[in-house]
Amino acid sequence: MAENQAPDVKLPDPVEMSRAMTRIAEQSQRLVTEFLSRQAADGVGAKNPDPMGVGHAFLEMTTRMMADPAKLMKAQMTLWQDYLTLWQRTTQRFFGQEAEPVIAPAKDDRRFKDSAWDENTLFDFIKQSYLLSARWMQSTVNEVDGLDDHTAKKVDFYTRQFVDAMAPSNFVMTNPEVLRTTIETGGENLVKGLEHLLKDLERGKGELRISMTDYDAFQVGKNIAVTPGKVVFQTSLMQLIQYTPTTPEVNKRPLMIVPPWINKYYILDLREKNSFIKWAVDQGHTVFVLSWVNPDEQLAAKGFEDYMVEGPLAALDAIEKITGEKDVNAIGYCLGGTLLASTLAYMAAKKDDRIKSATFFTTMLDFTEAGELSVFIDEEQLTMIENQMAQQGYLDGSKMATTFNMLRANDLIWSFVVNNYLLGKDPFPFDLLYWNSDSTRMPAAMHSFYLRNMYQKNLLAQPGGVTLGGVPIDLRAVKTPSFFLSAREDHIAPWKSTYMGAHLFTGPVKFVLAASGHIAGVVNPPAAEKYCYWTNAKLPKTSDDWLKTADQTPGSWWPEWNKWVGKFSEGKVPARDPSKGGLPVLDEAPGSYAKVRIV
């Protein structure tokens, strides 16, 4: 919306508008009725109005802030000085003069990508006034003295949530692109946006579940998760997939991948062009992947120990029957890596050395610095989660999805609010976002054990702190050669935390740091020629010292890993056909467990 450019104005069709509003009214009435019925049935009035303790945290922050009025006054004066400067420079622009901005958005802030935010003086003022207020608010709460670490993190996190929510880009009258579209379409964008909003409310049964992609554009096993393979074994918790070889010879030692069960395994097999699984098969690995079940109330009592016994331990036995090979190389991703490390410690206590090398993708073992997810881990919130799980037998997948989305609210919440509800656009088909929305449940017993023993108490990092199968485990007993892959911008498993975990093992450790985040840092095929990674032959005590002397290499880390794991391949054997192994084929990949969708 440049100042000298007037958009075409389209008058709304009164008949179409009337029909649309009738549909919206009928749908709204139905949703409100259903919502009120659920509220009454759930006894909302008896519930804790602040189960996450946010109000208490801000009350404590405010009390301590008011105890130092001089610091508060100084902060206010700084804000007023910034605003005065902004007024002066905006006035200069109104009179046609050049003026440097007082503040500018970060380079990766896509909220203000429309040219009108810079070219139009009014919108430039709105943008800068918001950025000044946001900076003032966050710096003020961060400088309050006397708060304990957890309360300070909670205040900072929810202040940022508020600041992100109040961005001018999120409102019709202060977003130039939305205003322009509203004028050009005669308001059709807002009507369509309202229909999108009601559809998302209906899909979430009264809770807003923002559509991030076109869910009809993908189907697991049809155009996503399509690498050929067979389901060759299963337990109540996982199906074991063996992939069809693409090379005449394969590495003698099979590769077992243990993905997280917070999301589905096929993040490693989205499309042929970005599938780590397909790439590993093409490098001559006999790839086995654990595809976890999407549990319901019948599996409520399944614990972390069950995931070990019915997961990697059962898979090891099955792989030996299928291939005749007792030993494997293993990969664990995120929570799957935490399980793999726990399994290695258990096996070490049992004198079981069948896993000859272990790779960990963005895996936390020491939860001392658990990042922003620690905001959600305190006694009040754990009790709330456990109460919810006690009623259902599991944690609903949407709860986990919302938590992860809040870590990147501008990208994973507000950008879709603007696109879907204000601009009235349909979500774009995107394989990664389809996977992100393909939520999984968490069994009550497992999830409570994981959150309390690892996130809250950090017992996994302590010798004998966690007991599995009657065995107190100790990660220091793990002597297996290990490859740790972390991502520099990871909000879920912060790389400095994963680095601390790499020091717990006593075997040889290679640590590699990828650029980007928890997903893009891992799923980065060589053909894409994107990002970079860092390596270091040494493993100094601190992550900062490691990075200071690390070497940077452009592109994907995948070949670096393949070179490392090749040292444990034990030569070559003829390719293994999944249909001719030691166990009967149960299904075609990706199997039935991966196809269970709960949204």
Image (spheres, rainbow, N blue to C red):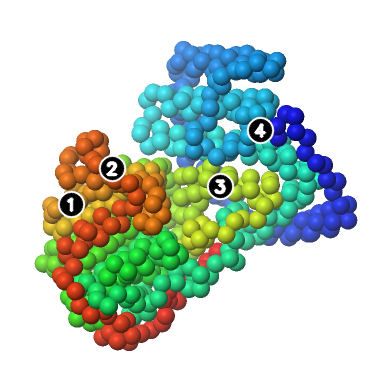
Residue designated by label 3: 413
Q: Look at the image and tell me whether residue 466 can be seen.
A: no
Say above or below: 114 vs 254: above
Q: Kindly state the secondary structure of the residue where label 3 is placed.
A: helix
Secondary structure category for the residue under label 4: helix
Could you give the CA–CA distance between mark 2 and mark 3, rounded to whole angstroms? 33 Å
- The Cα–Cα distance between marks 1 and 4, rounded to whole angstroms, is 51 Å
Locate residue 242, reporting x and y percent. 33, 76
What mark, if any, has residue 509 been given in the picture? 1
Q: Which residue is mark 2?
A: 552
> x and y percent of residue 246 in the render?
33, 75
Kind of residue at badge 3: Ile
Residue at the image point whose x is 30% and y is 75% from the top: 247
Residue 319: x %, y % from top left: 25, 77
For discs 1 and 2, the disc positioned in front in the rendered view: 2
Secondary structure of the residue carrying tag 2 is strand
Left or right: 222, with 455 as reference point: right
Q: Is residue 537 visible?
A: yes
Q: Which residue: 60% across, 61% down?
A: 214
Give the label, 1 or 3, closer to the camera.
Answer: 1
Amino acid at dot 4: Ala
Q: Quadrant of the C terminus?
A: bottom right
Give the residue at x 52% y 45%: 411
Residue 563 at x, y = what percent?
A: 22, 59
Q: Is residue 384 left or right of residue 310?
A: right
Labels 2 and 4: the sequence-earlier one: 4
What is the secondary structure assignment of the residue under circle 1? strand
- Provide the residue designation for mark 4: 116
Task: State the mark number for residue 375.
Answer: none
* Above or below 190: residue 317: below
